[in-house]
Structure formats: C-alpha cells, structure tokens
Amino acid sequence: MTIQKTAHGTPERQKQRVSDCALSARRNAKKLFPLRVHTGDLERLKSVICDALRLYFYKYQEEIQPWVYFAVHAVWFAVRQLDSRTRFDMLLAAAADCLSAAAATEWEMRTLPDSFASAAVSLGLPEAQVQELQQKRLRGPANPFQEEALLRDILEGVIVPNIALRDKDLELLEDSPMEFVRRDVEGFPACPHLPRRACVSDLIKGMCRLQQQQLQQLLLQLVQQLAGQADAAGGGATERGARLVDSAVFVMAAVASRALHSGAAAAAASPTELAAFFTTHVARELQQQQQQERKCLAVAAALKFLATFRAQLPISLLCESLPLVSALLLSPHEALRAYAAFCMHRLLACRNSQGQRLIDPSSCQPILLKSLSFLRQSLSDVKARENEFAVKALARLLLCLGAAAASESLPLLQLLLQQIKAEASQPGNPVYCHYLFECLAVICRLASDQTRTNAASAEAGASCLQQQHLVEEHVVPVLSVLIQQSQHEFTPYCFQILGVLLEGASRTGTIGSSRLYVDLLEHLLQPHVWVASQGNVPALVRLVSVFLRQLQQQGYHQPQQQQQQQQIQVLLHGRVAQLLERMQFCIYHRKLAAAGFDLLNAIFRFLPFEAYKQLLPTLLTVLLKRAHQLQQQTFNAHLSFSLLLFQCRSPDITALPCGLEQLQQGLLQQVVCAIALPSVQHSLESGCSLSKKKVFMVGLARLAAAAAAAAAEPQLLHKMLQTMETLLSGYDFGSDLLPFVAAAAATERADRRAAAGTDFDPDDDVSWSPATTAAGTAALSGVSAWRYGGFARSAARVAASLAAYDPAEQAARATSQGYVSREQLGVKSTTAGEKGGGKEEGEHAACSMHAVRRKEDGTDYAAAQVRRGQRQSMLLAFPPLGPKESEAIRYRLTIGERGSF
C-alpha cells in the first residue's frame, strides 16, 4: 500500500528505499511470528485431510475399511497434541467429525495390500514401527472403537482437555451476560456457541451409537472424577472449582440426554443416579448461595441441570429447590437472574404423562406468589431491561396462579404497559416484546375469567367487574395509541389483546355498555387497517367475528346497553358490503385465504340471510372465479365447507342452487361434482371433526332436497347420496358402548373451547337440534319419494342414520312440532320402492324406517345417550383438516382494485 501511494511523483531512489523497507518488514514478520503463520497453514491441511477421511467413512466404506485402524489412530494422535489456543478449533472440529463418522460404522477385518509395508517405508516410516502397527492391528478387534484402551485414550486426550471453559469463552459472560445466557440455554448440552464443547458433544453422540454402554460407564467415572476435583478445589467458591463443577454438569448432561433419547442405555444414567448427583454435588451451590458468594458459573450450572432433567428428578426435590430458584430472581448478577427465570419457567411448564403439572400450584402457592413479586421487582429495575426469560417466567406464573394472582395484577399491568411504551419508542429485542404482550394478554384473560366465575356472587361479581373495567381503562388507551401510530411490529398484538378484552366483555354482557367498542368496530372495517400488514388479518377476523356474534347476544337489560347493542347491529347490517370486500381481499391473498373463509363463515353463522341476500350472486362469482384461478385442493376444501355451511344456515334451501343456476346453467352440477364432493371425500380421508361431518351431512341433504338440477340429473343425485352414506358409514349405532365415553366427549369439547379461549366453539356450526335433524330427514325422505326408485334404498338408509343421531325426545319433539311425520316417512319410502325399485327396495326402505320408529319409541333412552357420546368421542378423535401452508409470496392487493361488492 505504501509503494502504491508513493508511485506517482516520487524519485526512483526513494521508491527503492520504500521497497527495501517493505521486504525487511516481511522478513522480520516471519522471524517474529513463525509458528502462527506456518502452523495455520498446516492446520488447514490437516483439516482438509480429516474432511476427506470423514467422506470416506460415510460413503466409501469398502475402500477405506482395510485402513480404518491406521486412520483412526492417526487422527487421534494429531488431536491429542493440540492445546487450548483458538487457532486449533477448526482442526479439532474436523477431527471430531471424522472420529464420529468412523465410530458410527461397524467395521470388519480386511487384509492390507502387499505394497503397504514398502509404501510406508518409502514415506520415511521405520520398518520396525510398520511391523509393530501391523501386529497391533491383527491382535485387536476389527472395529478399533471396541478397544477399551482406545476409548480411554480418546477420553483422556480429546474429551477431558476440551470440556473446560477457556478464558475466551467467558469473555461474553462478562461483556454481555444476557447474550451469553441466550446462547447457552438454547443449545445445552450441545453448546453450539462454545466451539470446543460443541465438538466434544458431537464426538460423544457419534461414539455412543455403537459403543454406548461401554463409553457411558467411562463417562460416568469421569463425572465422579471431575466432581471430586471440584470439591477438592473449593467448589463454586473458587474459579477453578466453579469451572470443574460446570464441566461435570456438562458431561453428566451429555451422558444422560443421550441415554434418555436412545432408550437402550437408560440404566447408565437412571433417575436415581441423577438425583444423587444433583443432591451430592450440585444442589449445595444453590443452597450456599445465600450464605456466601458463589461463582456465577457454578450456580448457573446447577440451574441448567435442574431445568434440563426436571422430568427425571423426584417431585419432592423439585419442590425443595423451588425456593432456592425463586431467591435467585433478585440476584445482583444479571446472568443469574436470567438463568433463574429460565429454570422457573421450565419447572412450572413440566407435566407428567397424564398431563398433570409436576409442581402443584395450590401446594406451592406462597412460594409462587413470592416469585411473582420478585419478578415484578426485577423487571422494575432499569438495568434489567429486555430480560425475556423473566417475562416468560412471569407469564407462566400468572397462568399457574390464576385468580390467586389478582393482588399483583394491577401493579404488573402498569409495569407491563410502561415497558411496552418504552419498547415502542425504541424497539429492541423482539422476543422480549412478544412475551410482554403475552403477559398482558394473560392478565386481560384472567380478569374476564374471574368476572365470569364469580358472577353468581353479587359482591364478588361487582368487584371483579370493577377490576375488568380498570384493566380496560389502562390497556385500551395504550393500544389505541400504538395502532394510531402505525407501529406495524406491535399492531397484530394490539388487535389480539383487544380481541381478548372484547371476548371478556362479551361473556360478562358488558360489551354494550361502552362507546369504545362501537368506535373500535368502525375503525376495524377501514381498508388501510387490513392492507397495512398481513399479520393484522387473523386478529381482525377474530375481532369482527366477536362483534358478529353479538347479533345473537341476549340479556341486555339496561337502556344504555340496549342502545349500544342496537348501534352495533345497525353498523354491522350497514357494513355487509365492506365485510365482504375484506373477505375478498383475504381470499385473493395466498397466505390469508384461510382467514378470509373464517370471516365468511362468521357472516353465514351470525348475520341474517336478508342482510346479504342481494350480494349473493356477486359473492358466488368472486368465490368461483378464485377457485378457477387457483385450482388448489386446500382452497376448494374451504370453499366447499363455506357453501355447505351456508346451505345449513340459510332459511331458503333453494337460495344456493338457484343462485348457481342463475349465474350459468349447469353450474350447480359442476360445483357439486368438481368441488364439493371431492373436497368432502378428501376431508374424510384426511380426518375431520364431528362438527364438519355435521355440516357436510346436513348441507348435502338440504342441497339434494332443494336442487332442481339434482332431480333432472340422476348421476348427480346418486353421487350426493353415496357421499352422504359414506359420511355415516363405519359406525354401529346399535352396539353397546361404554358409559364413560359420553363424559369423555363432553370433556373433549370443553378442552377445545378452553384452547380457543372462548365459550363459543368455532367448529360447532350445526347442532343436532330437532329442527335441523328433522328437516334433514324430511328432505331425504322427499328425495326417496322421487320417481327415481333406484335411489330409494340409499336415501332411506341415510335418512335413518341421520335420524339415529338424535335421542328419542328430540325426534318426538320434532314430530310434534310438525317437521316430519313418521307415518309419512314410512309411506313415502315404501311407495318409492314400489314405484321405482320394486318390492325388494321398498321392503328395505320400510325396514330402515322401522329402525327410525324404534329409535323414536324411547325404549332405551339412556343407552342411546351413551352411544351418542361414544360416537362423538370417536369422531372428535380425528384431527381436523388443517390449511396447507402456501408459498411465501407477498401479494399486495388494494380493495379498490378488486372490489366487487
């Protein structure tokens, strides 16, 4: 660089002097740093050789099999001479991968070529040494890793020198404690942020694949050796003792985690041995932390071990350790506060095989409340900002305590809102922001749940209702400001928390008592809110669905509430076109199509048909056009479900068939045959819930009864009846079933509602009410009365199965209300058989109707209820058909460009 800068306008003699100085500096650099430059090149060469050997061990095992013994010993010999300097990390990693590849293969003895000895001598190896190597190879096993001597050599020469933390590894702990904790807890015990430990961890995993029992016994001996050395060095009170404790915990975690994952050698590190190791060598680091100062590394090792093996340690030991972990939440060391919060979250989140918490919140409530107070104090510290582990533990504590945390809710709420405003002004850690909003959502949900639980008591209900209003007064203004400031990172969280508050107000019947929600609804329907970010759309759909649900809400007694309820109804009825435009925006976006159909289903469920009757042709045009453009099974499945749901909910069963035929003659047959029936079959094959089966069954029945095209097309009617019969096939409605299944089905529905966070079951689209079932049965009986007698058997069988879903009282009530007559069913089915299919089909239809009549007699009502509960439990066991994730293409779309409504 100096020569280049002085090249222009410089005398020739000065150029020569500069060149001489540069050459002299280069020679002096070689003299001053001979090892660093030369050794680095040699290490790169050795690393390349190790990589080449690794490829041979993986892919060309036949070619390298005679040389395995020499290759393994050569790699081990090269690694054991390395010291702790950083420039050897690359070679150690390559050598560890090479040894892991060799240890993962079962080698056999092969004869060496005749030219081996002469080639080795020509490369400078003494002949006596070559003969000695050959004799050792012949005396030993075919697989060199079966020799205990080699395993001990690798243990002492590779593993032991590289598990101890170096000064360079601990620099990050001093400079940035939170970053060190993040890297440490994410990969423990693999430790990807520590190069030497990562190599050792990979080597242990590779060697344990075939030599698991033998190696684990050696490693357990090493653990005891390291623990004894740590005790002799003073444990966590000294720097050397703390590093030895950390090394012992690392080796024990590596051995136990490998044994637990494989299962073959779980006895090598049993829960009893884990508990004994923790009690003898690790727990005292937590216990003595109160009396005297311990090194951060030793206490962190104890917390990591407790969090990693929480499921294997005894519950009594976990409960005894919980106060010690709680006290560390206020440790002066920032890293220890993070480790303690991480451990607290893991302990509280752990469950046994029955789904029960290992730590019972009711028995440990005083300790948990004290931990909640400690976390609030820790988060109040300005120096402890952006500790995502503390906020995550706070959310877990609130969920575990529930109503018991009511005394801390308002102070925590104010603290969280302050932190959210600080993060909004200067965004930092996104994970920390995420858990801040999660804690906020938990507090909002607990307030609404407590209000609903204590609704029976007047005093408690009023107090809880007042607390819910306080939560709304604190939260809503902050979220409104974030939405108005267009904080796109936080806007989806704001909408989701507003949805939690809105659902809570909906449960308690206070949604109509505030002008706030009316103003919120007007803002939600604005196009720019939906177009700003696709992350807003799922929360917006949820909010709009809650508002739509209010159209069926009853029980408002105060004049102000009734007035607000009427305003919401008027606003929604007047914004139907805007709702459909938002739906159109979603379905024309590849990643938001599922959310668009959720909004459409909410419109079909809660809005009266008259509100969107005039827009039905345009709606069908938009949906079918998009289906024709995409030609995707996932989109067709959503479309079929929505259309059949509309057919179930619509008071006019001819609206959908007539609407399709008005668009184009024969379109009904195309939609049913090309979209609806294949989608129903695909959903059945993939497994769908009972609620979807209800929608498919009743929707197809009403469609078949109302479709004039079905009467004119025998094949279409035949396919629809076959699909309906498939929906009900495979279930024996007359078998004796266990009585506990009805309770299991009810519990499953309650769990599904609790998971959704609402009393409303989003999948419960069609209930088996008397009107719905009897109408479907009457529709199918009408189908069987058509002149196509060949379909009488299928129609009667489906009608009988559909009617068999209801208990006797519901069928009797349906008959008394005039929905369907049993005599009409029997006469029509028999008449249809006599007209079209002959005596045999008529007798079969009459037998099916006789089964319906026996069902309606109510002779075994209790057994019918049990059978119905068992069927629900069996059908709900199938997972629902989930949306297939589409390709990640950003599809910008404005309402004005695609607006069709």
Image (tube, grey):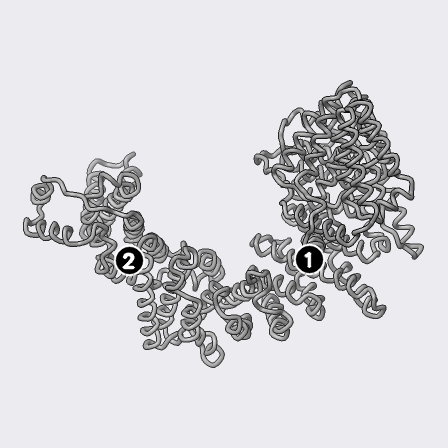
Q: Which of 578 and 869 is in front in this view?
A: 869
674 is higher (above) or lower (below) than 744: above
Label 2 packing within 10 angstroms: few (<14), some (14-19), many (20+): few
What amino acid does circle 2 point to?
A: Arg
* Residue 217 on image: x %, y %: 32, 64
Q: Residue 85 carries which label?
A: 2
- Amino acid type shown at disc 1: Phe
Report the number of discs.
Answer: 2
Do residues under tags 2 and 1 come within 8 Å of each other at their CB atoms?
no
Q: Would residue 25 be seen by someone viewing this image from the given angle? A: no
Task: Give the image location of residue 786, x and y in percent.
Answer: 82, 25
Toward the right, the furthest residue is 559
Residue identified by numbered label 1? 740
Above or below, comparing residue 461 to residue 625 in the picture: below
Residue 609: image location, x then y, percent: 85, 36
Q: Earlier in the sequence, mark 2 or mark 1?
A: 2
- Residue lying farthest bottom? 291
Residue at x-position 50% and y-position 70%? 314
Q: Which residue is drawn at 75% across and 47% down?
A: 543
**In this picture, residue 721 sits left or right of residue 205:** right
Q: In which quarter of the image is the C terminus?
A: top right
Instruction: Label 1: state its secondary structure.
Output: loop
Q: How far apart are marks 2 and 1 (CA)?
A: 66 Å
Which mark lies nearer to you, 2 or 1?
1
